[in-house]
Amino acid sequence: MNRRTIDVGERLPLLETIPLSLQHLFAMFGATVLVPILTGFDPSVALFTGGMGTLIYIAATKGKVPAYLGSSFAVISGLTLVNKTWGDPHAAMAGALALGLVYVAVALLIGAIGTGWLDRLFPPVVIGSVVIIIGLGLAGVAVNMAGLSPNNHVPAGKETAWVLTAVFTLLVTVIGSVRFRKFLGVIPILIGIIAGYLFALAMGLVDYSQVVAAKWVALPHFVFPAMTPHSLSAAVLMAPIAIVLITEHIGHLLVTNKIVDRDFTKDPGLHRSLLGDGLASTFASLVGGPPATTYGENIGVMAITRVFSVWVLGGAATIAILLSFVQKLGALIHTIPEPVMGGVSIALFGVIAAAGTRLFVEAKVDFSDKRNLVLASTIMVLGVGGSHLRLGNFELDQMTLATVTGILLNLVLPQAVEKPEGKAVPDSLARQEAAAAEAD
């Protein structure tokens, strides 16, 4: 029995939309609030800017691309340096503003020159490999949260409870994704989180101290960009990171293309998708939030549930905005134990990686061709091996480094001439066959 697909523009009744939106909210919550915690900014602002950024993105893409935007991990080092080491949050936001403006400028440039170059940069072997590393590159995070990594940070004495909670959550999520029917079949992530939460509560892993301390209603701590002695340096430091975010965004969009089975680079266009992300990042910098990026966690939710409605994602964004002001509710969501999210994330990130493998099969990528083999292996090793490149204050994380390397190798390595049936042949033989055909 095939599960019903909820299309991009489809609007469901409110009572169905709310749990579907909550599912997306829970999926992105941990990562979105982690970035401001690490960089010294207010997590409530990140919730607010993530929600507003998602609505901006939906508007910029004419409601045609399902995506949720949250805090980007690519900016952690830059924001930390300026805010914590230099002690200048206003300069940090000035740097983030420069990043957002560069992002918008590149989006407008791509809108002017078109997207024909995408097919040259991203053939199926590169797209499939990038999709795989987007999922597997996050695998370590999921496994660590689940307490299954030798370098985990599970509190002493809670190891067994932690792992059991993660495994129980994973099992409920996986079984629900396969066996649940009707409306339950589109909220297996939410059911997995609720079941895991109750299990964790019984195991003594839920801490309500933050909920007790939080206020009911309070304004987030907004921080505005300003010209300070460090602002120019922050702008020079952070503006180039826009290229990292753009590369990451293109990778996520290509994944979404495969999951939804639609080419969003053509309609509404890559430039609109990038513009939405750039405008969201620019907006975030104006109020003290981290620059935005599309979230792999939410792509994973869509892949499992087959719910692509922008109304559902817009609902998640609206709830996030409300939670940024109702701090007790935000704190309550923050009590979801890490092993619960670890168990869910194992399923989410695995589905993304599997989508890359499916792309190889559907595109009939020939791995007897050494060129394809070298491209895929290089991208995947860099993408999952913990690679990291620092050039001065400019950094490339493993996913971006792998993607950029794959693009460059694809441009540099010579391509064999293709026969009509797709078999590679030497250039000389191809010319002979062409000459024979003309003679006939």
Image: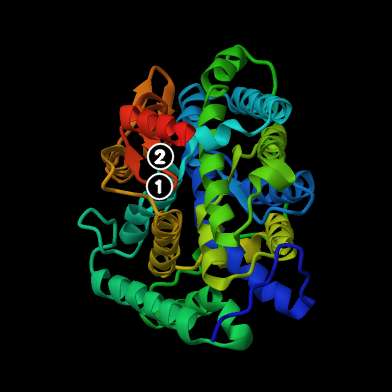
Tell me the quarter of the picture where residue 64 sits: bottom right
* Residue 84 placement, left or right of 431: right
Q: Position of residue 302 (x, y in %)?
A: 57, 65
Find residue 299 and name its label.
Answer: none
Q: Position of residue 319 (x, y in %)?
A: 71, 62
Quarter of the image where the N terminus is located = bottom right
Label 1: which secondary element: loop
Residue behind mark 2: 418
Label 2: which secondary element: strand
Depth check: give the residue in front, 85 or 378. 378
Distance, label 1 to label 2, CA atoms, is 5 Å
Residue 66 in sight: yes
Query: Type of residue at label 1?
Result: Gly
Residue behind mark 1: 422
Residue 221 in sight: no
Colour treatment of the image: rainbow
Depth check: give the residue in front, 118 or 384. 118
Give me the residue at 75% from left, 46% from top. 61
Q: Residues within 10 Å of mark 2 (few under 14, many from 20)?
A: few
Height in image: 176 above or below 112? Answer: below
- The reply to whether the C-beta atoms of the residues labelled 1 and 2 are less than 8 Å apart is yes
Query: Type of residue at label 2?
Result: Glu
Q: Position of residue 421 (x, y in %)?
A: 42, 50
Height in image: 295 above or below 194? Answer: above
Depth check: give the residue in front, 314 or 79. 314
Give me the residue at 42% from left, 27% from top. 411
